[in-house]
Amino acid sequence: MSFLFGKGASKGPTINYQPTGFSGGGLTTSYDYAGGTGGTSVTASPERKGLVSSISGVYGDQANAYGNLAATVAPGFNDLLKARLTSIDNSASSAIGNLRQNLDSRRVLGSSFGQDTLTRAQSEFSQQRDAATADNFLKSLDASNQLITQQYNAQRGQFQTGLDELNLEANVGQQFSSTANQLLAANAQAQAKLDAAAQTGIGSFLGGLTSKILGPTLGGVGNSISASLGFPAAKTA
């Protein structure tokens, strides 16, 4: 009778299922049963970490390249402006010199008409200088803005690569943990049903056994024994 009254008498078959984890794409998931509490972990392989680091590094190199290029914009446009202004000055000097000679040959250089003509010519070339300066500034500003935007986009990509990897690992771990918890909960319910069925079966066995041995009159003794052991009482005729 030891198998009836031993420590395992009230237990049915034991379900020993444990989530097996997942491995693929350089990611490995596992379920830790230490302490009986359980916990999900996600581990990235050295190869995957190396690839993520390499991609991040490429974005960093790209950002540095844009930064170095942006540093050359202002000096480059300054040189361009200087050349444009020199060309305008040369044209102005030549044109005004020719205009003076023409006015002088007509003997109107000192007249109000001659002075007005020279003033208008000088004003026109001054406007050309101002227009060249403004145009150069706007183009330099636009080029710098584009390069700075590209530089910061590359820097953001450098950090976004690492963040995307962490988010991926977190999502994988969350999905695995959710599935594992659902399976473990289902196993616990199944185990409880097996234990209840085992207890009911043992109680019926004890009641029936005593009824056969002691007769129907003393069959209640089996039910008392079952009740004292925590098993449901058997039905007697």
Image (cartoon, helix red, strand yellow):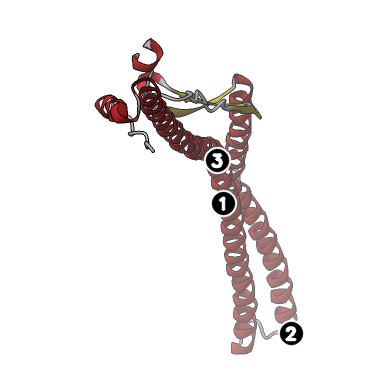
Residue 106, which numbered label?
Answer: 2
Question: How many C-alpha atoms fall within 10 Å of the one at disc 1: few (<14), some, or many (≥20)?
Answer: some
Residue under pointer 1 = 149
Seen from the viewer's position, the closer of residues 117 and 169 is 169
Q: Are marks 1 and 3 in contact (CB under 8 Å)?
A: no
Residue 16 visible in the displayed image: yes
Q: Disc 2 to disc 1, how far (Cα)?
A: 59 Å
User: Disc 2 marks which amino acid?
Assistant: Arg
User: Disc 1 marks which amino acid?
Assistant: Thr
Relative image position of residue 6 (x, y in whole percent): 35, 13
Q: Disc 3 to disc 2, how far (Cα)?
A: 80 Å
The structure residue drawn at horizontal position 64% and vertical position 21%, both measured from the top left corner, is 47
Element at label 3: helix
Indicate whether 120 appears above or below 88: below
Tag nearer the camera, 1 or 3: 3
Seen from the viewer's position, the closer of residues 167 and 54 is 167
Seen from the viewer's position, the closer of residues 125 and 63 is 63
Residue 7 visible in the displayed image: no
Quarter holding residue 35: top left
Relative image position of residue 84 (x, y in whole percent): 67, 59
Residue under pointer 3 = 164
